[in-house]
Amino acid sequence: MKEVAVIGFGMTKFGELWNKSIKDIFVEASLGAIDNAGVDHIDSIYVGAMSSGIFVGQEHLGAVMSDYLGMNPVPSTRVESACASGGISFRQAYLDVASGNSEIVLAAGVEKMNDGADVTAALATAADQEYEVYNGVTFPGLYAMIANAHMHEYKTTRKQLAAVAVKNHSNGANNPNAQFRNIITVDQVLNSTLVADPLRLLDCSPVTDGGAAVILCSMDIAKKFTDTPVKVVVSTQASDTISLYERETFTTLKAVSKAAEKAYKQANLKPENVDLAELHDCFTISEIVVSEDLGFFEKGCGGPAVEEGKTSIEGGEIPINTSGGLKSKGHPVGATGIAQIIELYEQLTGQAGKRQVKNAHIGLAQNMGGSGASCTINILEAV
Ligand code: COA
């Protein structure tokens, strides 16, 4: 396998982009990445997108996007794994370069969720239709079950869930591309509208339009384009049951722990070697569970860790979601995994401004689909 580097990025602002089509959003992010990396051609394209057919009535996104980007006849492939579509698009691009098949690859993700579709029903297509959705379960509902189980088993508190949202909004306030840049308090979270008990409005990631793109190339040629390439140390993926009811426990996401185990082993790293992480906080409880399943904290200690500032940028042991996470930056589902990689790239190249983590050398991105049935982990390193 060849060594692979990330050499540039581009993204749109995340939010409600009423005046832009899904094609405009994709092209803006991709041209930004091509320009930022300074490459003169692309060998292949990966497009992460979850439900463009339902959200905007457009499928066949690989071909649509290479065409609209003016890149024909470059091979272009759409990657779908629900909310992990972006992260797995990055992984496919990584494997393409690592195998020696392509030299320079565009890995992108896009979603336009605000266009009139029934978003809750569209997102629910990532759950088990027969056993979960038919019985009325939604994604806030599934994660509420996980939250209730975690609160019962480990005495995780409502305030600890709120602390995740407060931290992520505080980080997102310094991210110009974030959807919600307002500072919030624990009281505001606790008094926001109830969505699915115990999760409230400010525990939820929002409905977002947005696109994100990065350029990968073999490490052999990376220095031709930039003095600060970022190495992809490892990229792993794992799967779990699609339905929650089939799992031994609701409080551990097995696809996360399995993908992490493999990543640490392949990279010869331990959780304590990671300097910062972008985690899939689609709901506040998911950041807590995932921070435990990645080995950053013992089971049951993820909630107290957030409250004690262990995941904060200033003075934290392991700053988590410095970008603002899905909660504040927004969650255009197909683009999220790529936006996580962009945050790591900015941090590892010292470009994160007020969000900068001191001495950031190794970063981990964890992106998952549904209630954790698919998960990818990508670890990046400054070289
Ligand atoms: N965080 C902060 N503010 C939010 C928000 C969020 N997640 N979602 C909406 N808002 C704000 C809006 O900006 C709006 O503010 P305004 O009145 O000042 O303009 C207000 O709350 C109401 O917005 P609205 O769009 O009517 O909310 P909604 O009730 O339709 O949707 C949720 C709220 C939580 C149901 C929706 O954001 C949601 O479904 N989130 C989860 C998405 C999801 O499941 N993703 C996949 C995860 S696996």
Image (cartoon, grey):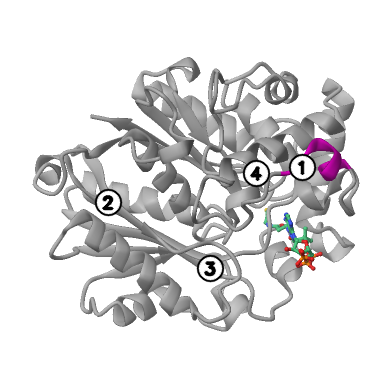
Secondary structure under badge 4? helix
> 19 or 268: nearer the eye?
19
Which circle's residue, 2 or 4, is located before the other in the chain?
Answer: 2
Residue at the image point whose x is 84% and y is 46% from the top: 199
Residue at the image point whose x is 43% and y is 43% from the top: 343
Secondary structure under badge 1? helix
Q: Is residue 189 magenta?
A: yes
Q: Amino acid at mark 1?
A: Glu
Task: Characterize the magenta stretch by its predominant secondary structure.
Answer: helix
Secondary structure under badge 2? strand
Which circle's residue, 4 or 3, is located before the other in the chain?
Answer: 3
Q: Residues within 10 Å of mark 2 (few under 14, many from 20)?
A: many
Q: Assess whether mark 2 and mark 3 are in contact (beta carbons under 8 angstroms).
A: no
Residue at the image point whose x is 54% and y is 57% from the top: 81
Q: Which mark is residue 8?
A: 2
Which circle's residue, 2 or 1, is located before the other in the chain?
Answer: 2
Q: Amino acid at mark 4?
A: His
Q: Is residue 113 magenta?
A: no
Q: Regarding ligand 1, which quadrant of the image does it lie in?
A: bottom right
User: Mark 1 = which residue?
Assistant: 246
- Magenta stretch bounds: 184-190
User: Mark 4 = which residue?
Assistant: 169
Which circle's residue, 1 or 4, is located before the other in the chain?
Answer: 4
Residue 236 seen anywhere in this rendered image of the structure: no
Q: Gap in Å between the C-alphas at discs 2 and 1?
A: 41 Å
Name the spot of residue 7 as percent of width and height, x first: 24, 47
31 horizontally vs 200: left or right = left
Toward which corner of the image does residue 146 lie, by quadrant? top right
Asked if 20 appears above or below 209 in the picture, the reply is below
Q: Amino acid at mark 3?
A: Glu
Q: Gap in Å between the C-alphas at discs 1 and 3?
A: 30 Å
299 horizontally vs 42: left or right = right
